[in-house]
Image (cartoon, helix red, strand yellow):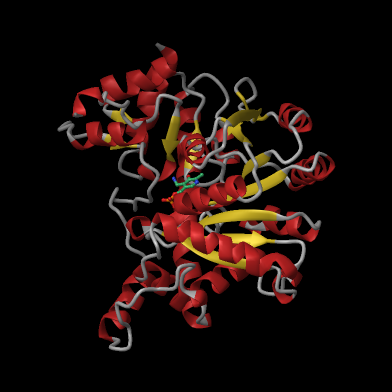
């Protein structure tokens, strides 16, 4: 019966990661997968997470009972407050709420499913390029019409804002627009505040529906409020939206699948029916979410002292990323590598779209055992003081041959 099943294509990022793991070259460098690495190229469990987990291990009041279908309220409420800001009027007015989800991916999936099944939205727009999973998630949720909006201008290695706005202006009413809240993946380029205002203008004029994807709050700039600026500004302008939040990066809880889907409605009247329909969607998919990671996050977000400790943990990560951007640019300038490398420091977050061509990327992999995606995307925190000169020299060679 399984004869009909054909081999599916590999997932590039995991495939490259496996090639890296199986490579025995001593200078190999992994710039593929989107996870934080410390300066010794090792995964890093945030000290705040270790601390809370130790307390939890001793806490006999924590049981393994099911969570409610929409998740742990101490977690979802704190997540909404972290995204919108504690004092946001939408919270006080009871028209903002959260649903616990299986990390950011699960939030996108539940949100898309809801928009398709309940509001009958069928068209979605994603940036060109975007995180490669957006397309699949929305198609699997019942959306039928995928469209791209322009984003990366390869020539200037910056945002094509005019192309972006023009594509939005041509979008049909109720098209869902996926927007990266901060630290755009894969380019690392975010709109400026003025550009966000222009995007919001078109969203309002054309009656589009913004779906924010917030996978890097705090991780991007080190400042939770700054990284949430765009979402908050849309809310302030009276725009209804949803936002998928991930705690994979900013808490380093990748495998615990901790996420929240924030809804901001125009009025509190519809909150109960919307929540009831979301309950049925979750019920039919996985019934209820896991507790461990949500408890860790809720404990930290709801305790001012722990919250401050967490903030210093994220600042450490974001500072290291920013330093590595500067170091890579400095090395390339020192080597006299042709072209401008300013975009590496202008970009933000885990990733840099280097502007390397697929052939140059291939050369880095084959000749230098430096692993990156074919698009030229690198994970900046794969760089460290021990390998930065090696990587810069490899890039120099790839660009000049
Ligand atoms: N959106 C974007 C843009 C991402 O980069 C990621 C992480 N790679 C996610 C969503 C979701 O990741 P997760 O499901 O692990 O939270």
Q: In which quarter of the image is the C terminus?
A: top left
Q: Is residue 13 above or below residue 270?
A: above
In the image as oriented, which residue stretches furthest toward the top?
401
Q: In this view, does 260 lie above or below 147?
A: below
**Residue in the picture at 37% in, 70% down:** 291
**Picture quadrant where residue 391 is located:** top left
Query: Would residue 216 appear left or right of 16 to someone viewing this image?
Result: right
Q: In which quarter of the image is the N terminus?
A: top left
Residue 353, image x, y percentages: 51, 32
In-front residue for pair 300/246:
246
In the image as oriented, which residue stretches furthest toward the front?
1
Residue 232, image x, y percentages: 71, 59
Looking at the rendered structure, the number of numbered marks drawn on it comes to 0
Residue 239, image x, y percentages: 77, 54
**Residue in the picture at 21% in, 37% down:** 21
Query: Would residue 22 appear left or right of 364 to someone viewing this image?
Result: left
Q: In this view, does 345 lie above or below 95?
A: above
In-front residue for pair 393/13:
13
Q: Can residue 247 be seen in this view?
A: no
In-front residue for pair 280/381:
280
Residue 111, image x, y percentages: 56, 52
Query: Would residue 149 appear left or right of 100 to someone viewing this image?
Result: right
**Residue in the picture at 74% in, 45% down:** 196
Q: Can residue 119 be seen in this view?
A: yes
Query: Would residue 328 appear left or right of 46 to someone viewing this image?
Result: right
């Amino acid at each position: 019966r399984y004869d009909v099943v054909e081999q599916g294509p590999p997932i590039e990022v995991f495939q490259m990661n496996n090639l890296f793991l199986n490579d025995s070259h001593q200078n190999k460098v992994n710039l593929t997968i989107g996870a934080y690495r410390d300066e010794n190229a090792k995964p890093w469990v945030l000290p705040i997470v270790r601390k809370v987990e130790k307390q939890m291990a001793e806490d006999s009041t924590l049981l393994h009972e099911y969570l409610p279908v929409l998740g742990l309220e101490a977690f979802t409420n704190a997540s909404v407050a972290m995204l919108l800001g504690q004092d946001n009027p939408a919270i006080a007015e009871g028209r903002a709420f959260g649903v616990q989800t299986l990390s950011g991916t699960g939030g996108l999936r539940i949100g898309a499913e809801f928009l398709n099944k309940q509001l009958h939205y069928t068209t979605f727009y994603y940036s060109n390029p975007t995180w490669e999973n957006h397309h699949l998630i929305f198609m699997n949720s019942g959306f039928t019409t995928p469209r791209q909006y322009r984003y990366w201008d390869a020539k200037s290695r910056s945002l094509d804002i005019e192309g972006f706005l023009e594509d939005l202006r041509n979008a049909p009413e109720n098209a869902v627009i996926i927007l990266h809240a901060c630290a755009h993946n894969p380019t690392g380029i975010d709109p400026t505040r003025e550009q966000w205002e222009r995007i919001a203008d078109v969203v309002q004029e054309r009656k589009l529906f913004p779906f924010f994807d917030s996978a890097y709050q705090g991780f991007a700039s080190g400042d939770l409020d700054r990284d949430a600026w765009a979402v908050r500004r849309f809310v302030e302008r009276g725009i209804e939206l949803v936002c998928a939040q991930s705690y994979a990066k900013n808490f380093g809880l990748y495998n615990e699948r901790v996420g929240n889907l924030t809804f901001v409605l125009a009025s509190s009247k519809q909150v109960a029916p919307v929540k009831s329909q979301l309950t049925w969607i979750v019920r039919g998919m996985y019934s209820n979410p896991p507790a461990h990671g949500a408890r860790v996050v809720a404990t930290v977000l709801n305790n001012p002292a722990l919250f401050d400790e967490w903030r210093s943990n994220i600042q450490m990560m974001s500072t290291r990323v920013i330093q590595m951007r500067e170091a890579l640019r400095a090395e390339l300038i020192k080597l006299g590598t042709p072209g401008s490398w300013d975009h590496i420091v202008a970009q933000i977050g885990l990733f840099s779209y280097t502007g390397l061509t697929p052939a140059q990327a291939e050369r880095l992999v084959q000749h230098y055992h430096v692993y990156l995606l074919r698009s030229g995307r690198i994970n900046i925190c794969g760089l460290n003081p021990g390998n930065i000169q090696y990587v810069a020299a490899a890039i120099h060679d790839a660009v000049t041959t």
